[in-house]
Image: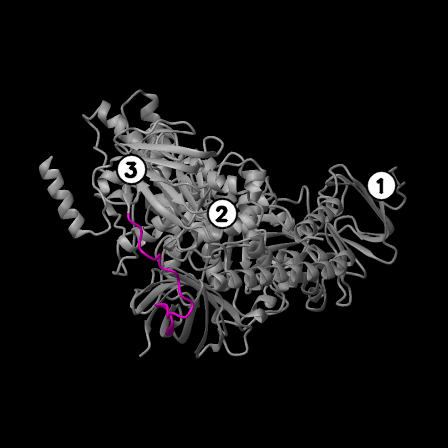
Amino acid sequence: MTMRTLAVLVISAIAVTLGAQERTTLIRNATILTVTNGTIENGSVLIRGSKIAAVGKDLTTPAGANVIDATGMFVLPGIIDSHSHTAVEGGVNEVSLPNTGMVRIADAMTAHDISAYRQLSGGTTMALILHGSANAIGGESQIAKWKWGRPVSEWLVPDAPRTIKFALGENPKSANFRPPPGQPRQYPSTRMGVEEVVRKSFVDARDYLAAWDEYEAKRKRGEAVIPPRRDLLMETMAGILRGEVDVHAHGYRADELLMLLNLADEMGFTIRELQHVLEGYKIAPEIAKHGAGAGTFIDWWGYKAEAYDAIPYNVALMVRGNVLTSVNSDSDELARHLNHDAAKAMKYGGLTEDEALRLITINPAKQLRLDHRLGSIEAGKDADLAIWNGHPLSTYSRVEKTFIEGEIYFDRARDLERREQMRREKEELLKKEADAQKLEKKEKTDA
Amino acid sequence: MILRRLVALLLLSAAPLVMADVPGVWAITGATVHPVSGAPIAGGTVVMRGGLIESVGANVAIPADATVIDATGAHVYPGLIDAHTSLGFKAPKEKDAAEPTPADLAIRGVSIASDDADSRLADGVTTVVTAPSRGIFNGQPVVLNLGDGPVESRVVKSPAAQQISFNPRPSWTFPDSMMGVFAHIRQTFLDAAQHAAAREVYERTPAGLRRPDERADLDALGPAIRREVPVVFVVDSAEMVRRAVALAAELKVRPIIAGAREAYAIAPELKNVPVLVAVNWPKAPTDAADRAEQPLRIIRNRVLAPTTPAELAKAKATFALVSGSGKGAEFLPGIRKAIANGLSAEDALRATTLAPARIFGVERQLGSIERGKIANLVITDRPLFERDAKVTRVFVDGSEVRLPAEPKKSDANEATPIDGSWAVSVAAPQGSVALQITLKAEDGTLSGTYSGDRGSGAIRGGSIDGNAFEFTISVNAQEGAEATDWLFRGTLDGDAMRGTVSTNLGTFDFSGSRAR
């Protein structure tokens, strides 16, 4: 078999697995962790096309359905990671300016980051892929599903809200991003400066909008008027003011988080989600009052100056304080087993099983404003889910199959099968290459 | 006339490669003529007069005033067009030299060393499309004949296009990330549209309005925005090609994709986008263990890259084969590799003649042997793309160019300029990182070792093409931390080198000097 036909076979095998559009799958005899409607023992999930068609105890098998017997297994909604930097090419930071709201993660997303596939193997199906934290206002972030094997344009969730990264504290004041020797350090270098950058950006945005309003008014009156510059950065800032762009703000300390919440109130926009927020337990009422969510780590602390006051009870305290809380990764590695970090919230602070599961499913779905179609096992929602061989809150459990929109993107058995195939393909390609090189060398010597 | 002769004589003595200044009348007879626009003609004749092709065919009368070249047994082709090069442009010596702008015409800056021109002519290339490869907006490429005579007399089309590369600037200079480059391109096109609108309003009603600034760089984008000239996007991987095609659609410009070495998997998507495929195919690491360590995707892309032209042919896409960056030494070997990977010799010929002529809108002047076209012709002793074929005579604008006696072959044993030890300094955010790197180039592959505070070992994935090189090393950022890859991309300039290092923490500048 030639390399080429092998490659075609592999691709068509994937295509067959991924299957046709209106395929029907019935997962039965499973423990269904619906997250929003409790647990269904010996339950079934019916998937039709890209959606969950029905969930319940006694579903009949439709004709032609692909039936998966999941006896002894668990079904959990796809885990949603509200803080990821996976699948970005050419840098997640545009470092050059204090405000880089004109750049877009979507432009740099790649379908070849193997971490996306590894995350599928941990039941994670979707993430908010954020710009880095090198500047006070970073670029537009992107919500995407890990549709491994598809062009990256299909990974982007088309109706997801626009989002942007803000950052407070050490990183945007250049403590961790220093220009090479001889080049001046970039403004700002203090927390005061970070606040000023954010405030100034919105003052500028208001001026920008006013300039355009003035232009439109003059134009309507028939006056000769030169159009203002269409500025991509200001367009993004204006989008935030109009409520079209959700702010996800990186920050650690209570004082600066409060600063941002107050600044947002002053400027007339809302912080959708505070990211990291390790001191959130100190200001849970204020966070809840503003209407912000919190995406945090369960037990990471002490790794930098601003992470010293972190406590593992942060999650439970924020949940009890009515803050919409998620546990997220900020890490290719952790994103593969967010279920473990959710489980730790039961140990630290005594969340219930359901509360723990919500931290990685429906809560991040709400933070991303996609809970109408994601984050739980309910009829009508996207069929993004994973079949686990045990309870997902146990360290001994692992994922057998991961679905996105009704298609299987990770299948443990198939993965194991394909390893040999891929090993052979690699061997054959290397041999082909070595043979060609030998030939070239020989031709050179002949010449 | 006498003065003309005198000048010619002077030129002859000054530049021994010049054979004639005035194109004469020539008849090449007895050869297999490959007009490209039609089927090959056995025992055909081509007549050139005054720099143009006067007639071509099996039964063509030979003019009485023609100098006859008996080419029995030989082959005649249109001069090859290498439609994407940076020939005649060097990396500037000053580190903070200004980037090109959209207003820059390549024809104003091009300066092709005669050695470089000779080696291209010896490959049968009579025309290049060239522009600097620096910066994001590279300026406006020129379609230029090689050969003798002042550069103005050799221009076929200028400007031929706008050209855009996705080169981030050094760290802490906007844009220093790839996504930043996209934002910068978008903003520049928005600014160009705004500037045009502002000028229109102002020209109509200057009284009471602040006059717009003079912005030649923005004005220069007008023809691209109006789709009068195409925009060449220089991109390599399949994903970069897709990004560029999507950006072109967003900007509503006419794209030409240049590079596209790994586009084999997305050939059907390129049916309606002209592609200039660079045939300087990706290089394998010299060490077998290094090769085996690479992930399947990298190996697959590298090994299947030379199938890209065949896949594009299958998809009925419009494509040309080009040398890409560097001095073009890999042009013919690269084309041969594409043929070995499924491209027909006929398609390869079209992709180096008529296809690039059409892509740049010069098909009425170049790309085939037809009456009235520019007399750029190449005579070979065997079919052009056969391994042992030799280019024996070359005509540009109807004048013969003398070829170098023995075309310079790269000698594997000859020391190449990059060989040796280098002291390299990387400007990382936490301070500069010093490395000792020993390099050796062989057939475009770069091997060597590195050592320094952050670890030591063999370099991987090294390649060199002209002055441009790249290689990867593994670096331990912190003690006990997992090693990460640093990808060096740089240019060589005598005893100095510089460029950028891509790391998981960002892209940094590096510079190096030869260790004594």
Magenta-colored stretch includes residue B405? yes
Q: How many marks?
A: 3
For marks 2 and 1, give the one nearer the viewer.
Answer: 2
Name the one closer to the observer, B352 or B226.
Answer: B352
In space, the residues marked 2 and 1 are separated at their CA atoms by: 42 Å
Does A38 sit above or below residue B151? below
Relative horizontal placement of residue B206, taking residue B322 as reference (left or right): left
Question: Tag 3's secondary structure?
Answer: loop
Q: Amino acid at mark 1?
A: Ala
Q: Mark 1 — on which chain does it sit?
A: A
Mark 2–mark 1 CB contact (< 8 Å): no
Question: Could you tell me the amino acid type at mark 3?
Answer: Asp
Residue B75, located in which quarter of the rendered image?
Answer: top left
Disc 1 element: loop
Residue type at mark 2 is Ala
Marks 2 and 3, the one that precedes in the sequence: 2
Q: Which residue is mark 1?
A: A65
Mark number, residue B260: 2
Q: Position of residue B340 (x, y in %)?
A: 56, 50
Circle 3 is placed at which residue position? B397
Depth-wise, is mark 2 or mark 3 nearer the camera?
3
Which percent across, then down, holds residue A127?
Answer: 61, 52
Q: Is residue A324 left or right of residue B467?
A: right
Q: Which chain contains the residue that carries disc 3? A: B
Q: Position of residue A159 (x, y in %)?
A: 59, 39
Residue B428 visible in the picture: yes
